[in-house]
Image: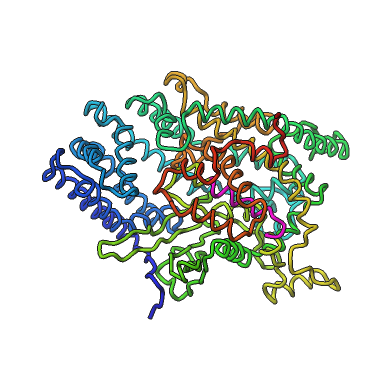
Amino acid sequence: MSTLPQPLLRIVAKDDLVPIQKRHVAGRREIVENMMKTVSIEDATFDNIYAPLLRYDDSTLNDTNMNETLKYASPDAEAQAAAEEAMKSWSDHFTWVQAQEKFIQMTIAAGERMDDLDPESRRRLEKRIEYFKRLGHGSLDAATRKAYNDTRREINDLCDEMNRNIRLYDGGNLSFADAELDGLEQEDVERYEKDGTGKRLVPLTRANYTKIMVSATNSNTRRTLHETWTSRLPENVALFRKIILLRDENARRVGFKSDAELCLSGRMAKSTEWVEQLLADLKAQLHEPGRVLFQETEAIKAALANKHGQDSESDAETTVQSWDLAYLKKIKDRENKVDHKAISAYLPFKETTAAILRNITKYLQLRLEPVAREELVGCIWSDDVDVWAVWDESAEAKGQFVGYFYGDLLDRPNKYKHNQTVELQGSFLREDGSRQYPAAILMCSFSPDVVDGCKVLQHSNLITMYHGNHGYRVCIEFGEAIGTCMENFAWLSDELQNISCHYVYTGDAYKQAWMERNPGQALPPRELPAELISEMIDRRPKFRIGYYLKQLSDAAFDMAVHNPKTHKDLEDLDETKLFQDLGAQSSFVPANRLSIPQATFSHLVSGYNSGYYAYVCSNVFGEEIFQSNFAADPTSTTAWNRFRRQLLQYGGSKDQTEILEEFLGRPPTTASLLKSLGIVQPA
């Protein structure tokens, strides 16, 4: 018999996903139709218009979230397709609701009778009314609203199609001779099967792309793979163009000057002008430091060309190209005594991920208990998934259960190819007064290297894990700011040493394999040596400048396609060339004219349209949070309590700009971010 504090959500059979969701849609539609029949606009209140739907949505939330999870993560393509169809029926229902003018008017009327509401209920209703008014209710005719809803439905379908193409991409293989793969570890080369001519078949996956771009000494190999990888999914080019044109058309239809203005009206950003000014100001501050750093890369490329001679096929030209950047960075790291492979040996997958979660929960005065594998039968969508029960160990909570945490960290076929936090179960009070506790998923797409049979992480995976421990149902700028603040912990020497353990100490088989490869040598230290990471940490500001320039480039593209001056400007725009040029400006290399970067920019078809700037904002806000609260003592109990109580615990129940400014004692500025990058502003 299970002793779990709350039953785990069970996986729904794929054949039941659509019928269950359609039943929920029918039930919700019946509630809306009944309210329109029985409640007058004059009598509309929160209790008789909005509360019944909130209660119904709570009762169906588990099934809706299960569909969303399976859409992203199920290894079964048929289950994914069924989940996607189920979610489409849910989305279509909300489009139908927005066409029910009487219901909208009743909701708006309820907003005139909010004096007795608690602050959270008041905020929920105000946000809903603000949303309806933003879409022209009360000011637009029925035909215009219908056209808006029909177009929105079409946009959603196109986004689903584009995302599906990205998720299910199978580009086959590229073939290379062994000599063309020089620079890779021999065991990595031997993992690739041979074709009939003896060449190695390299599957077109992100893991293989990254490995070869970093390690292959032959620039022709890197170029061939890079040009193939960055030009994948050409079918998405037309889809993306249609999406941005329809978004712009729809925003103008309901009275906004662009999709960006429409989207920003519900976020922390003050205006499209504010966003564009922020991007321009940071670009101006970072461009010259970035160009100076790029000169180091150019010097390495020139030295290689000189070393190999002008006849060398691997580095015959001195101009740095886009396919050179990762390879030259590895050489630069080696020259600066940053050995990422050696660092990875201290980051075994299972032990390191558990240690990160252990530390974060300890800082927050929480406790994790792993759920036994036998309890997970029928409750996880892949054997890769681990689950922990979470308990609150703060003095006032006295060990109360507060929810479940799921880790789904490894890449696999059909899975979403980026990193995100996903709500599996929401928290709410039932009508009988009992509470459903939340369940959250950290969903990543890691492809660990395997050394002596042990999976080991890259330091970049650690950054992702620390970042991913933020919530949802808040403004995207705020959620990402929490994650960006947390990234700093992946760069603290004491923290890295605390979570590390050389893989030879995690299993006898790994130790034996290491000893056979290193006969007569003493075992490596158990903990990550400080000298192995000191230079990497010292060089972080330089690394971040290039990283932020890339973010600024992507955010500028997002704003360009979602905030044109006129619709005609957007029609005339060559978005492929624009994205290529922005990328070239941020990386200081010639534009790759074969690339189609928008074809795989999944953020812009997954809710982050007119929102990629949030990653830039999050770095500004997140650095402010870290420097003001954690920099002096990153493990301070007082600092973590303040972080938890004054930032995290509100969720979406309070205005996030107010939360942040109250926490800082002032509005945020870019000063902390620029200081962390070593950029001194004039007084």
Horizontal placement of 195 versus 266: left or right? right
Closest to the observer, 90 or 180: 90
Is residue 507 covered in magenta? no
Closest to the observer, 553 or 496: 496
- Can residue 221 be seen here? no
Residue that appears at 44% across and 63% down: 381
Residue that appears at 70% across and 53% down: 198
What secondary structure predominates along the stretch shown in magenta?
A: helix
Q: Quadrant of the N terminus?
A: bottom left
Q: Quadrant of the C terminus?
A: top right
- Residue 593: image quadrant is top right
Percent across and percent down for residue 181 are 73, 49
Closest to the observer, 349 or 98: 98
Residue that appears at 40% across and 78% down: 3
Horizontal placement of 124 versus 274: left or right? left
User: Residue farthest to the bottom?
Assistant: 1
Closest to the observer, 657 or 282: 657
Horizontal placement of 429 versus 357: left or right? left
Residue that appears at 72% across and 71% down: 504
Image: 114 above or below 403: above
User: Residue farthest to the left?
Assistant: 38
- Can residue 213 be seen here? yes
Task: Give the residues drawn in magenta, as a range.
Answer: 481-495
How many marks overall? 0
Is residue 486 covered in magenta? yes
Percent across and percent down for residue 465 are 58, 55
**Colour approach in the figure:** rainbow
Percent across and percent down for residue 539 are 75, 46
- Residue 355: image quadrant is bottom right
Percent across and percent down for residue 489 are 64, 54
Image: 249 above or below 21: above
